Each structure stands twice: as structure tokens, then as C-alpha cells.
Image (cartoon, rainbow, N blue to C red):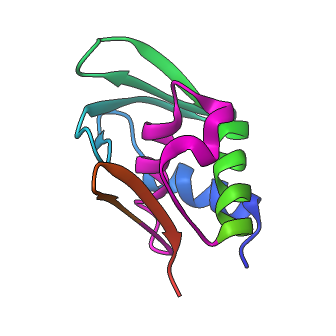
Amino acid sequence: MRTFEDVWRDIQSTLRAGQHVKTLCQKVKNEIVEVNPDGIKVRSERTGAIRTVTKEDFEHVWATLSDLEEFHGLRSVNRIIGRRAIACAIMSRLPYVDGECVQGMVRLGIKR
């Protein structure tokens, strides 16, 4: 199993300012504004709001995913409400994480 620090390095190396990431179910386009050691700043195309998905947010998603190996719905990561959908969408870009929308719910899983 990968450590979170490995996952964090992969997230940071995968993203570049100016790229777009769509949420898995709502398909809301988010522009990557900044990638820094503490988090990823994104701008929602729907609201125009800029928010930061922190390193700790991603760590929470990875810890949940590591424990469960797969989860359906965003309730599993309720601690980061307001950043859950985009955090899961970003994590699904990693080659060892599978993400999709199933019956209107986010499904995230570790690829085997």
C-alpha cells in the first residue's frame, strides 16, 4: 500500500495550473489555479469561487480509501464538505485510483 506522502507527491506532479478537472458526477469544471506544498487551489466554473483543497483533505480521502478499499457516495468523507467532490475527482486521476459516477453517487476505489 502506498503511503500518503507518495500519493501527495503523485497528486502534485499530476496537476498544473491552468488544467481543468471535472467532478465525477456533477461534471462541474474546476480550473487548477495553483499547486503548492499545502494544497491545491481550484476555481469552480459554476460558482467562480476559489477554494483550497488542503493536503490534509487529500490525506483524509486517502486514509478512508485505504481503510475501505472502495467507497460509494461522499458521506464517507463528510469531514471535508465543500471540497469532497473535487478532491475525489483529483484523486481519480491517479493511475492506481478508480473513480466514476454510479447512479448519481461518486465511487472511488483502489485499483488492484
Report whether 99 appears left or right of 97.
left
Query: Relative to the observer, which residue lies in front, 32 or 67?
Result: 67
**Residue 107 sits in which quadrant?**
bottom left
Q: Looking at the picture, how far across and down is residue 97, in whole percent?
A: 49, 69
Query: Relative to the observer, which residue lies in front, 103 or 47?
Result: 103
Above-or-below relation of 53 to 104: above
- Numbered label tally: 0
Q: Which residue is drawn at 31% across and 31% down?
A: 30
Above-or-below relation of 82 to 59: above
Q: Which residue is drawn at 38% across and 11% down?
A: 49
Q: Would you say residue 50 sits in the magenta stretch? A: no
Q: Which residue is drawn at 45% across and 56% down?
A: 14
Q: Looking at the picture, how far across and down is residue 100, in whole percent?
A: 33, 61
Q: Residue at x 50, y 80 (%)?
A: 111
Q: What stretch is highlighted in magenta?
A: 69-98
Kindly give the residue lying farthest to the bottom in the view shown: 112
Q: Looking at the picture, how far across and down is residue 34, in whole percent?
A: 47, 29
Q: Which quadrant would the N terminus be assigned to in this image?
A: bottom right
Q: Would you say residue 91 sits in the magenta stretch? A: yes
Query: Relative to the observer, which residue lies in front, 70 or 43?
Result: 70
Report whether 86 appears left or right of 75.
left
Q: Looking at the picture, how far across and down is residue 58, in whole percent?
A: 64, 45
Report whether 60 appears left or right of 90.
right
Query: Relative to the observer, which residue lies in front, 96 or 41?
Result: 96
